[in-house]
Amino acid sequence: MTNGIRIFASLVCLAVIAAAFASAPDVRASQPAAPTLVVQAGRTHVDFWHGLARPLGGILEDIAAEFNASQTRYHVNATFKGSYPETMVAAIAAFRAGNAPHIVQMFEVGTATMMAAKGAVKPVHELMKEANVPFDPSIYLPAVRGYYSSADGRMVAMPFNSSTAILWYNRDAFRKAGLDPAKPPKTWDETRAAAQRIRSTNAAACGFTFAWPTWTQFEQFSAIHDTPLATKANGFEGLDAQMATNSPLHVRHIQTLLDMMKEGSFKYGGRDSAGDALFPSGECAMIHASSGLRARVIRDAKFDWGVAYLPYYNDVKGAPKNSIIGGAAFWVLTSPRRTADEYRAVAEFFKFISRPEIVARWHMESGFLPITYPGITLVNALGYYAANPGADIPYKQLTRSLPSRNSRGLRLGNMPEIRVVLQEEMELVFQGQKSPKAAMDSGVRRANEILRRFEQVHAGQ
């Protein structure tokens, strides 16, 4: 997908959510009656739209098939609908036509927008209670539970593929460069030195890169350094939050990346997930990317690889703190004449995917986090971490400190659109058109305009 299409998809996604979801009751009232419930072999049918390409999407669809085979009353049809923004655009179009899928997967930065979609979303705590299906939010890791909970602490979405960003590195390239493959860089100074060494010895065509630029280099970076991404506890404490990504530390970091690019130790891999391909292909020896890249690395990498914690500037007081979650959650959408049995089917599916064996399986096969305590216990009991050193790094990094107001996560409206803005400003720096300070100041101004528009639409909700 080209950058232009990505931008369009993100903007359309957020614009449609804000407009269509905000007027959910009126939209639903104007629609004709929904089609008769689809039943396969006497089962209640559930449509589940997700945004995971293979191999991850294949694993997810296998889990849905396992649920279908585990009982005879319900059938979940899991369908890949494209990227997260594309999946959401499709879901909103279906919602406006009165035929929303029962479940849609939405990336974590859409949480604030989805929570503001009154009438279009059925909160998970409400779903499970009405369906009389047992549900214990306390089994989820605090960082996961808190991210998808309302201000009063009730879970609104069902967590599933939660991830965090980590360092992936090529041990073979480290050996070729004369670096110790058992000692990945811990700080940014060490990261830069390792990348320089890899390039000077031609151990790899690229020393360092990253995927999901704003997630890894702004959102995770801010949490680890206990530095605000935005005011109001990164938006958790109010819609009137303002961006803070033009702080001296953020400007310093963009300058570091620019300097590394000029010296040839860093390569920009592109927006969103575009940079992912540079590591398993062997082109770049180090990458900051999702822990969920694991399935792809296992499938594609033809070299010895390892994982480690994200680096930090060791002169920043309080660093390193915990990282924050990424990934996505499952949201329950409403639709005209949706039956109680359909909602019960969704609740039973959510109960199934919360089982320790499913949580453990998903973690071990995908690299996403084990998001429940029973799941973590089972993974340990199976000896997975002993047999796969480093596989527990995402969990350890996420939980290595108590979350602060700056490392709890973020709850900013229209965050995907803000990500586009920050990526654009970062690229202007890399292209030599702006200084890091000018770009970050511009990014804050533009992002604040986005936040104010969101605040105007949803103030008082």
Image (cartoon, rainbow, N blue to C red):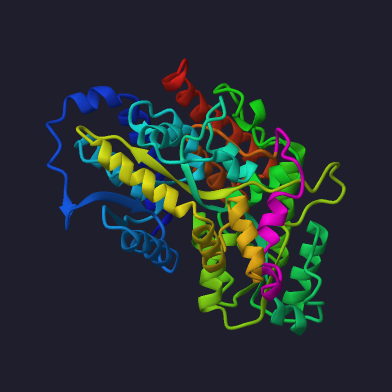
Q: Position of residue 258 (x, y in %)?
A: 69, 55
**Quadrant of the image containing the C terminus:** top left
Residue 187 falls inside the magenta stretch: no
**Quadrant of the image containing the N terminus:** bottom left
Left or right: residue 443 compared with residue 332: right
Name the residue at 36% across, 59% down. 67
Residue 431 shows in this picture: no
Residue 460 shows in this picture: yes
Numbered disc total = 0
Q: Is residue 391 above or below residue 27?
A: below
Q: Is residue 288 above or below residue 328?
A: below
* Residue 167 vs residue 442, the one in the foreground: 167
* Magenta segment: 385-406
Q: Residue furthest top?
A: 460
* Residue 233 vs residue 4, the one in the foreground: 233
Q: Is residue 446 above or below residue 58?
A: above
Name the residue at 37% across, 53% down. 50
Left or right: residue 345 compared with residue 378: left
Left or right: residue 250 compared with residue 33: right
Q: Position of residue 405 (x, y in %)?
A: 70, 32
* Residue 367 vs residue 63, the one in the foreground: 63
Name the residue at 60% across, 48% down. 325
Residue 398 falls inside the magenta stretch: yes
Q: Position of residue 35 (x, y in %)?
A: 13, 41
